[in-house]
Image: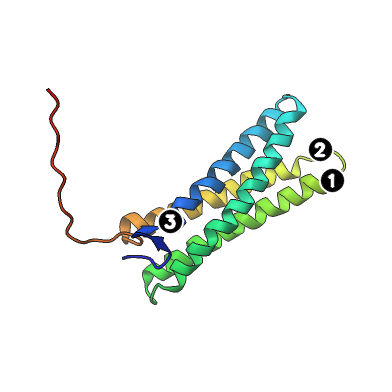
Amino acid sequence: MSTRASVRRHPIHPMLVVFPLGLWIFSFVCHLVYVLGGPAVWYTVGLYAMGGGIVGAVLAAVPGLIDFLTLGRSRVQTIALSHMIAHTSALTIFAVAFGIAVFSTDYSMVPFVLSVIGLAAVGVGGWLGGALVYEHGVGVECEAREEVPMVEHA
């Protein structure tokens, strides 16, 4: 099932989601290092990573929404809606954590705890996204392709 938001038949949404996911995980690791006694620079780097993940998630959501709106009413659309809700929840949680961290005068554990909850939401959304692709073929074009011969090395 091809998607509207694509470049030369390559869906854009899966290309972009790796950035917020990686940045949010890295942000969590940075904050964990800080909580376990690391220097304050880990906290700062974690904030930058969290902010970058928020920006990346908003950018990834645009082609994801375009793809969602092109799905017909079906079981696939229901799964896609759950996927969207899980990741929108994660984005909201990380945005709240970022806001608390940026605007508080001293360190608080609340952003760290919210990151854990946000990563759980990301895990649920990722599982559902995998179901969309691997079980229902969303973003996968099934057409006959020319087979490329194997090159044998001597």
Q: Are marks 3 and 1 in contact (CB under 8 Å)?
A: no
Q: Along the line of sight, which residue is nearer the eye, 3 or 136?
A: 3
Q: Residues within 10 Å of mark 3 (few under 14, many from 20)?
A: many
82 relative position to 144: left or right:
right
Q: Residue at x 44, y 53 (%)?
A: 14
Q: Against 111, is 13 above or below?
A: below
Q: Colour scheme of this structure image?
A: rainbow
Say what secondary structure mark 1 lies in: loop
Q: Amino acid at mark 2?
A: Tyr
From the image, which quarter does the C terminus lie in?
A: top left
Q: Residue at x 63, y 53 (%)?
A: 55
Going from N to C along the chain, the mark reached first, 3 or 2, is 2
- Which dot marks residue 104? 1
Q: Are marks 1 and 2 in contact (CB under 8 Å)?
A: yes
- Which dot marks residue 129? 3
Q: Residues within 10 Å of mark 1 (few under 14, many from 20)?
A: few
Going from N to C along the chain, the mark reached first, 3 or 1, is 1
- Which dot marks residue 107? 2
Tell me if residue 135 can be seen. Answer: yes
- Residue 141: give x, y in percent of width and height: 28, 61
